[in-house]
Image: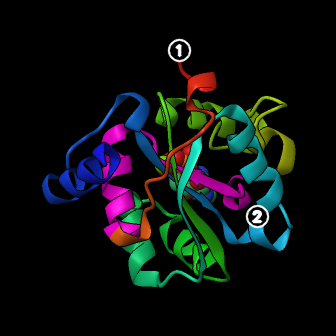
Amino acid sequence: MICVALTVFAYMFQAVITGIHERTFIAIKPDGVQRRLVGEIIRRFERKGFKLVGMKLMQASEKLLRDHYIELKDRPFYNGLVKYMSSGPLVAMVWQGLDVVKVTRAMLGETNPADSAPGTIRGDFCVEVGRNVIHGSDSVESATREISLWFHPEELTCWNDCADNWIYE
Ligand code: DAT
Ligand code: MG
């Protein structure tokens, strides 16, 4: 119930929610889907203890991707990035948990796979910045913006996690 109320509140007021209800937007990019990395990537976040509250396989429009990456619109790679991201299906997800934005960013690795430590997703599964298999929100504020861009409130599911007491003290 509290989870539903928080979701509605966050949508209405673009409110930033932290603590164990913090949420982030993660997308397995078209190269991650083509290379059959979906299961492996979801497995990592599940095993960490985060909670999946939204997921869809979709081919994103160029318009959605231009909005999503609006901060990069003046960068030389912007058009190529939008083309690559719209070139095939991706898996859009919302994950929830304590410090989920910061921790999932660490699990992703650096933007450039060459700078990503082994053990991170980009460190383990890709080599070039323009094909770096996964997106993750970089702050709680951008997570709030990206979640409302990619998901309708009713596409996010609040569910009772029976493992909660074993993940949080
Ligand atoms: P991140 O995805 O780690 O948050 P970002 O927001 O700076 O990185 O950039 C978004 C995406 O744009 C990134 O995942 C891959 C692409 N990109 C970034 N820098 C690039 C570059 N120098 N050349 C090509 N693509 C780049
Ligand atoms: Mg970014």
Question: Can you say whether 115 is above or below 39 in the image?
Answer: above
Q: Is residue 109 visible?
A: no
Q: Nearer the viewer, residue 81 or 63?
A: 63
User: Which residue shows up at 45% across the image and 73% down it?
Assistant: 65
Image-based side of 82 in relation to 153, left or right: right
Q: Amino acid at mark 1?
A: Glu
Q: Amino acid at mark 2?
A: Gly
User: Is 70 in the magenta?
Assistant: no
> Along the line of sight, which residue is nearer the eye, 102 or 39?
39
Image spot of residue 28 (x, y percent): 66, 61
Residue at figure coordinates x 67%, y 40% from the top left: 108
160 left or right of 37 in image: left
Q: Residue at x 38, y 59 (%)?
A: 147
Q: Which residue is mark 1?
A: 169
Residue 140 visible in the current orientation = yes
Q: Residue 32: which numbered mark, if any?
A: 2
Eye-nearest disc, 2 or 1: 1
Badge 2 density bin: few <14, some 14–19, many ≥20, Cα 10 Å: many
Q: Residue 150, labelled with which disc?
A: none
Q: Position of residue 102 (x, y in %)?
A: 50, 30
Queried whether the magenta region covers residue 138, the answer comes back as yes
Residue name at image x 37 percent, y 27 percent: 19
Q: Which residues are magenta?
A: 127-153
* Rendered view: 32 above or below 4: below
Identify which residue, 108 or 15, lies in the foreground: 15
Point out residue 169 in the picture as x, y percentages from the top left corner: 53, 14
